[in-house]
Amino acid sequence: MRDVLVSPKPLFRDRDEEEVRGYCDALAWIHQDAQQIPISNETIQRLHAMTRGHIWDAGLYKEKDGDIIERYPDGQERVRFRTVPAQETPAAMTQLVSDWQTCIEDR
């Protein structure tokens, strides 16, 4: 774990190690520049890109719908969490950022 977090350019053995390093880098950026980082779609996508590494969807909003499904040993399933449909995600994120900015201004 130490090699993943402190090495200037680690060789990742798997996706988990790459993700851990991405979260470390994202947190370092936040701690270093918190006052200058705007709450925006661009910032959210940059953080997503940092934590996803070299995965094809890094920094992009989802293209396909995908609810969180819980599967039981007996084969039954239930929707654990219904996500925003992919087509609505960019607008939903824009609204989320706007709502956040309104909250900050009203503080």
Image: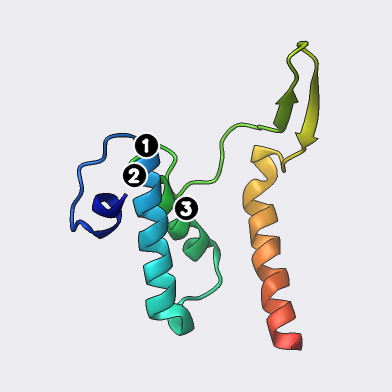
Q: Which residue is mark 3?
A: 48
Furthest residue to the front? Answer: 2
Q: Is residue 24 visible?
A: yes
User: Which dot marks residue 18?
Assistant: 2
Q: Amino acid at mark 1?
A: Arg
Q: Name the amino acid type tagged 2.
A: Glu
Q: Is residue 29 above or below residue 19?
A: below
Q: Is residue 16 left or right of residue 4?
A: right
Query: In this rendering, would 18 be left or right of 99?
Result: left
| Nearer-the-camera pick, 46 or 91 | 46
Mark 2 element type: helix
Q: Is residue 53 left or right of residue 100?
A: left
- Badge count: 3
Find numbered disc 1 in the image and state the secondary structure of the residue it sits on: helix
Residue identified by numbered label 1: 15
Residue 104 percent location from the top left of the image: 69, 82
